[in-house]
């Protein structure tokens, strides 16, 4: 009798396991058949507006847009610094790509500093201007944090694609070589860094990346090919690891622009305590607020780093 009951239980568990496998396979098939988002898909949607635009320099592109939630007076606001991608290039969209996340974060009670900067093709873009703009833009939060009631103890740097690289670079500025023209000021230290499909290790991407961003020439233009010295010593996160412990590297499973292997290789160099994950979708699903990638995988880490939620489960 017991043997029969045990056999029946084993059969039942086996059937449940098979059902789970079938369900996972079906979900994977649906995911694989779902068309990937493009930046044109995103920008074709209506966009909300920031509360104000604030300059951090004299150039027309040296500004950020501040998004402020409606909260009780006196409540200190956690801050998310958004840094857009676009292959560091002027011919591709800018900070408007991050407006969708900015609106979602504002609705959740976060202040958002969405940063613009000069890029390759803009006067002064590339090396050193793009890096200097990001550094000045991030540090400029101090200039208006008190009057906007921003909590600079809970700032998260979050970038996408080329902006993922720049978010990590902004957190690694304390490690810049002493002689670098990119080393200046007192770097604002984040509570956490999130790189979404980031092109973090520039040498790796130059050697093995797809041509989606323009191939090796784009990396050469960014790092200032032709200048003396080691071009990657003050530009690539392959050399400049952020000292911050709270670092998350996120990749889209079907990303054709920054395939997940790049995130995995970079994350492996960061050591213990740093996290990486692969989410459903491709490159732009990571910055679309309705996706599983953002709602269920990325946003809990934003909340944790900003002191607004528990540590996410792995």
Image (cartoon, rainbow, N blue to C red):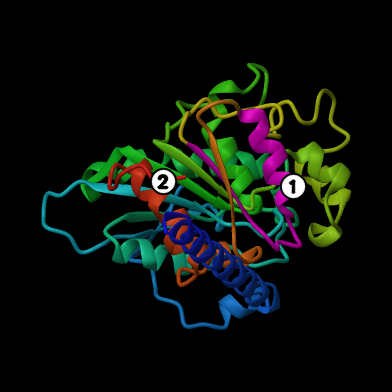
Percent coordinates x, y for residue 304 in the rendering: 35, 44
- Could you say which disc has been placed on residue 147 in the image? none
Q: Quadrant of residue 232?
A: top right
Where 183 sits versus 125, above or below? above
Percent coordinates x, y for residue 107 in the rendering: 30, 66
Percent coordinates x, y for residue 108 in the rendering: 29, 62
Work out which quarter of the rendered image holds the N terminus and state it: bottom left
Q: Nearer the viewer, mark 2 or mark 1?
A: 2
Mark 1 burial class by Cα count in 10 Å: few <14, some 14-19, many 20+: few
Q: Is residue 218 left or right of residue 153?
A: right
Residue 251 in the magenta stretch? The answer is: yes
- Could you say which disc has been placed on residue 313 in the image? 2
Towards the viewer: 178 or 81: 81
Mark 2 burial class by Cα count in 10 Å: few <14, some 14-19, many 20+: few
**Of marks 2 and 1, which one's residue comes earlier in the chain?**
1
Asked if residue 182 can be seen in this view, the reply is no
Q: Quadrant of residue 168?
A: top right
Q: Which residues are magenta?
A: 247-270
Where 230 sits versus 288, above or below? above
Q: Is residue 223 left or right of residue 153?
A: right
Q: CA distance from mark 2 to mark 1?
A: 23 Å
Q: Which residue is mark 1?
A: 261
Percent coordinates x, y for residue 47 in the rendering: 45, 77
SS at badge 2: loop
Asked if residue 264 can be seen in this view, the reply is yes
SS at badge 1: helix
């Amino acid at each position: 009798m017991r043997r029969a009951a045990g056999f029946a239980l084993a059969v039942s568990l086996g059937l449940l396991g098979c059902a789970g496998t079938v369900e996972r396979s079906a979900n994977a098939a649906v995911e694989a058949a779902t068309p990937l988002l493009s930046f044109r898909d995103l920008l074709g949607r209506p966009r909300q507006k920031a509360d104000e635009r604030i300059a951090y320099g004299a150039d027309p592109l040296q500004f950020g847009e501040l998004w402020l939630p409606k909260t009780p007076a006196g409540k200190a606001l956690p801050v998310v610094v958004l840094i857009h991608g676009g292959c560091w290039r002027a011919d591709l969209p800018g900070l408007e790509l991050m407006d969708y996340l900015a609106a979602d974060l504002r609705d959740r009670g976060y202040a958002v500093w969405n940063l613009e900067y000069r890029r390759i093709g803009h006067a002064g873009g590339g090396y050193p201007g793009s890096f200097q703009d990001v550094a000045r833009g991030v540090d400029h939060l101090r200039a208006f944090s008190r009057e906007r009631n921003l909590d600079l103890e809970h700032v998260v740097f979050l970038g996408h694609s080329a902006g993922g690289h720049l978010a990590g670079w902004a957190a690694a500025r304390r490690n810049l070589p002493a002689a670098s023209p990119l080393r200046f000021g007192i770097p604002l230290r984040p509570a956490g860094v999130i790189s979404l499909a980031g092109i973090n290790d520039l040498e790796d991407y130059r050697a093995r990346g797809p041509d989606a961003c323009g191939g090796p020439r784009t990396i050469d233009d960014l790092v200032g090919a032709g200048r003396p010295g080691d071009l990657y010593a003050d530009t690539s996160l392959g050399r400049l690891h952020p000292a911050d412990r709270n670092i998350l590297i996120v990749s889209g499973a079907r990303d054709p622009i920054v395939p997940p292997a790049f995130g995995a290789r970079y994350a492996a160099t960061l050591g213990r305590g740093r996290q990486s994950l692969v989410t459903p979708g491709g490159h732009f699903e990571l910055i679309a607020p309705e996706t599983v990638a953002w709602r269920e995988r990325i946003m809990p880490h934003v909340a944790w780093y900003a002191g607004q939620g528990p540590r996410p489960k792995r």
